[in-house]
């Protein structure tokens, strides 16, 4: 009985040690591989050119059977069964199919091997007849006299292409990638392409796209951990498409093998397995170029109330190219941009800020015109007006009438430029530059150097402002902070899983 009790106690302790996370660890899974959407939806094409110095291995993902092609250059395209006709069916194995295709080649007949549970040899059809039994195909053809391959292909049964030399990347449309390429036919005879590779190999192609490789190593490490965390937290984002993340800035920029650099690879390697946690779960690790001095709460930008994405000030002076910027837009510019993205408002009468966040970014912008008015909100503001960030003020714009009233009640319009104005601080001469006009219901900055229909947006920072500021990380690293201190500053209350 005592032995039985001790055995049960040991099992209980083991189970508890497995289920309860140790500080700095968590109950989450960092995948070995990640699937990146390269070409999909409107970016998918009907044909691609591929290159591999070691030749190719091609086959179905769902089967072990694969064919080694010595060809270095391949073309993969979509076709229909009406383009081909079977020459010989029910061939017992791959070698027999290759032998028959070789006989056809000696007779000058171009042949293709089709594998669909068994092998057959097909040739190009000269008499194309559409029937109800026609089906879509994926065609793989090399630059040699070797037979091509055709696959009946769907999203549920994709093909893969890998290099025969596992150390060589594969090039598609002139850009090189590690790992394998998976291809599947989608609607309209387009072919979706997914790059499957090791998670850290994916980061090799992300970090140098998101941060200059010459920056301080601690900043690069912070970027590597943030990028790894973002990937792990978003693995299900594109599951309906059959991949995890895409290669564009809507997730993280991914440039593949061509953009890799020894320094950013080092940053990825030296932070291997490390991600940012909040309550033992990977965070949504947003980051941006430059906060302009103060980051933004996630709720005020993306509508998500995440406790680790709060507004914080930069610790050190950043002094980036985006710390202060000024953009001049005419009323016509604003009218055109608002019309193309929102609605027609006609000739602009007024552009004004009607709501800002607690951190100081513009949340709602009112655009009034002769044909109507529109309120532009959140990220649409910088996207529509093509600004660097929402962290700005506005001056200039429509002419502001200033009226002097004499003792007998006579009113007279006046121009401020070149006039002396008596204010609380004494006599001021207004010439060029900015002037502030205050009244009972008015306070407006006016730029006296601009025409009446020009608006000046003068602001700070670059990007949405949520999470880690990349220029802020650079400044912190150059002032002695390490990557964990950088991440802990920009992501509130988090732990770094080491």
Image: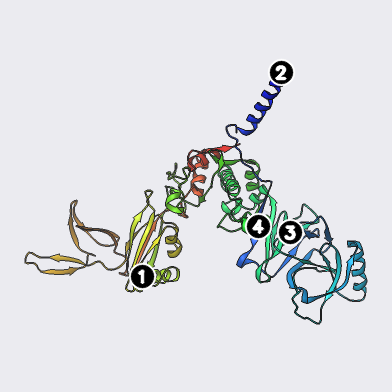
Q: Earlier in the sequence, mark 2 or mark 1?
A: 2
Circle 2 packing at 10 Å, graded few (<14), some (14-19), many (20+), is few
Pointer 4 residue: 242
Find the distance from the CA under tag 4 to the CA under tag 2: 54 Å
Q: Are marks 4 and 1 in contact (CB under 8 Å)?
A: no
Q: Is residue 327 left or right of residue 277?
A: left
Q: Secondary structure at mark 1?
A: helix
* Mark nearer the N terminus (4 vs 2): 2
Upstream in sequence: badge 3 or badge 4: 3
Residue located farthest toward the top when viewing the structure as drawn? 2
| Residue on which the image places disc 1 | 331
Q: In the image, which is nearer the foreground, mark 2 or mark 3? A: 2
Q: Secondary structure at mark 2?
A: loop
Q: Position of residue 183 (x, y in %)?
A: 71, 62
| Image x and y of residue 456, in percent | 36, 63
Give the left or right position of residue 325, taking residue 89 as reference.
Answer: left
Q: Which mark is residue 1?
A: 2
**Image vertical order of residue 195 relative to residue 400, above or below:** above
Q: CA distance from mark 3 to mark 4?
A: 20 Å
CA distance separating discs 2 and 3: 63 Å
Q: Residue at x 77, y 52 (%)?
A: 167
């Amino acid at each position: 009985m005592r032995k039985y009790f001790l055995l049960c106690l040991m099992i209980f302790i083991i189970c508890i040690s497995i289920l309860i996370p140790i500080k700095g660890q968590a109950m989450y899974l960092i995948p070995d591989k990640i699937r990146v959407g390269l070409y999909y939806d409107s970016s998918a094409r009907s044909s691609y050119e591929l290159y591999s110095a070691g030749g190719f291995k091609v086959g179905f993902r769902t089967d072990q059977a694969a064919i080694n092609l010595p060809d270095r250059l391949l073309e993969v395209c979509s076709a229909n069964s009406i383009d081909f006709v079977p020459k010989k069916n029910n061939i017992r194995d791959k070698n027999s199919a290759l032998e028959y295709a070789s006989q056809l080649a000696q007779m000058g007949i171009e042949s293709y091997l089709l594998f669909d549970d068994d092998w057959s040899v097909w040739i190009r059809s000269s008499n194309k007849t559409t029937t109800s039994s026609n089906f879509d195909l994926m065609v793989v053809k090399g630059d040699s006299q070797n037979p091509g391959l055709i696959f009946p292909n769907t999203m549920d049964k994709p093909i893969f292409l890998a290099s025969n030399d596992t150390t060589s990347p594969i090039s598609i449309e002139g850009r090189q990638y590690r790992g394998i390429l998976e291809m599947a036919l989608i609607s309209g005879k387009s072919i979706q392409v997914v790059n499957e590779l090791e998670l850290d190999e994916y980061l090799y192609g992300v970090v140098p796209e998101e941060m200059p490789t010459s920056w301080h190593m601690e900043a690069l490490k912070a970027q590597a951990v943030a990028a790894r965390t973002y990937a792990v937290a978003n693995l299900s984002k594109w599951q309906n498409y059959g991949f995890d993340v895409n290669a564009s800035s809507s997730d993280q920029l991914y440039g593949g093998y061509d953009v890799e650099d020894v320094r950013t690879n080092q940053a990825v390697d030296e932070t291997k397995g490390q991600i940012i946690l909040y309550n033992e779960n990977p965070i949504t690790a947003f980051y941006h170029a430059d906060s302009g001095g103060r980051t933004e709460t996630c709720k005020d930008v993306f509508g998500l109330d995440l406790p680790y994405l709060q507004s914080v000030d930069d610790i050190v002076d950043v002094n980036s190219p985006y710390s202060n910027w000024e953009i001049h837009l005419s009323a016509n510019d604003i009218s055109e941009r608002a019309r193309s993205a929102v609605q027609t408002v006609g000739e602009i009468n007024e552009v004004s800020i009607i709501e800002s966040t607690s951190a100081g970014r513009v949340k709602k912008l009112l655009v009034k015109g002769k044909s109507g008015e529109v309120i532009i909100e959140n990220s649409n503001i910088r996207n529509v007006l093509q600004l660097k960030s929402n962290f700005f003020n506005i001056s200039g714009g429509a002419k502001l009438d200033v009226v002097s009233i004499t003792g007998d009640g006579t009113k007279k319009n006046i121009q401020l430029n070149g006039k002396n104005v008596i204010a609380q601080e004494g006599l001021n001469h207004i010439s060029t530059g900015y002037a502030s006009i205050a009244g009972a219901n008015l306070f407006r900055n006016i730029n006296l150097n601009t025409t009446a229909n020009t608006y000046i947006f003068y602001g700070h920072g670059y990007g949405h402002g949520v999470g880690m500021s990349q220029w802020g990380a650079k400044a912190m690293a150059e002032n002695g902070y390490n990557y964990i201190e950088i991440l802990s500053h920009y992501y509130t209350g988090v732990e770094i899983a080491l």
